[in-house]
Amino acid sequence: MSDSVSAILLAGGKSSRLGTDKAKVKLDGESVMINSIAGKLSLLSDDIVVSTNGRRYDDITIQVRWATDVKPSAGSLMGLYSGLLAVNNDYAIAVACDMPFINIELLKYMISLPRDYDALLPKIGDKTEQLYSIYSKKCLPKMEKFMDAGHLKITSFLDEINVKYVFEDIINKYDPQHLSFFNVNTAEQLKEAQDILKNEE
């Protein structure tokens, strides 16, 4: 597998805007979204950890391990922390369960870069993607510090670690439409994702 990197699939969100568990949504009428994403991650790693708030998904048909949030309802930082704590390797890809169009070639490029960082994030303009990234276990102490101070978002600790970026010119070579970063949070976005899939057929 790709240079002994693990993968974390974050599936602990509340899906409140969509009104149903987005991990279990079917985009193509067959496979639920979380299983489709896990299948893509299996092309990059044989150590996949699904980080949840305690839920288990029987829909996942490949071998994964489960990490339950150390503290429930403690935000995305806790989900990432719990997953990173559980992985077998020093570095792990982290993606969310509502990102149906992850780009394997872009992730392979990111994996291939020298690991002289604590976190590697895509950056388009002023916007960074915290959940389409690679994190090192070296982040864990900083995460603990910020969670103990009541911070729940991943962005809260990034200024305290060594972050490197993959910039837009590189991203465009692999994913010119930036579909990698498309999230399904609402019924409208679900319909848009289904339309994108139909157009790709």
Image (spheres, helix red, strand yellow):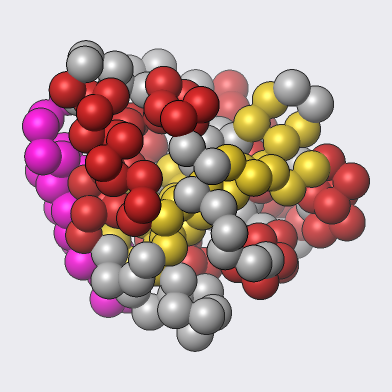
In the image, residue 138 sits, relative to residue 123, either above or below, namely below
Q: Quadrant of residue 72?
A: top left
At horizontal 45% and vertical 30% (from top left) the residue drawn is 160
Q: Indicate whether residue 70 is drawn in magenta.
A: yes
Secondary structure mostly seen in the magenta stretch: loop
Which of the two residues, 96 or 110, is positioned nearer the viewer here? 110
At horizontal 38% and vertical 37% (from top left) the residue drawn is 22
Horizontal arrangement in the rendering, residue 71 relative to residue 156 (left or right): left
Q: Quadrant of residue 81?
A: top left
Horizontal arrangement in the rendering, residue 155 relative to residue 102 (left or right): left
Range drawn in magenta: 51-73
Query: In which quadrant of the rendered image does the C terminus lie?
Result: bottom right
In the image, residue 153 sits, relative to residue 112, either above or below, namely above
Q: Where residue 59 sits in the image (x, y, percent)?
A: 27, 60
Q: Could you tell me if residue 30 is visible in this image?
A: no
Q: Could you tell me if residue 126 is visible in this image?
A: yes
At horizontal 36% and vertical 52% (from top left) the residue drawn is 138
Horizontal arrangement in the rendering, residue 76 relative to residue 147 (left or right): right
Q: Where residue 190 sits in the image (x, y, percent)?
A: 55, 33
Q: Where residue 177 sits in the image (x, y, percent)?
A: 82, 42
In the image, residue 151 sits, relative to residue 44, either above or below, namely above
At horizontal 80% and vertical 26% (from top left) the residue drawn is 125
Which of the two residues, 192 or 147, is positioned nearer the viewer here? 147
Q: Where residue 1 sits in the image (x, y, percent)?
A: 49, 84
Which of the two residues, 182 or 201, is positioned nearer the viewer here? 182
In the image, residue 155 sits, relative to residue 23, either above or below, namely above
Q: Indicate whether residue 108 is drawn in magenta.
A: no
Horizontal arrangement in the rendering, residue 93 relative to residue 175 (left or right): left
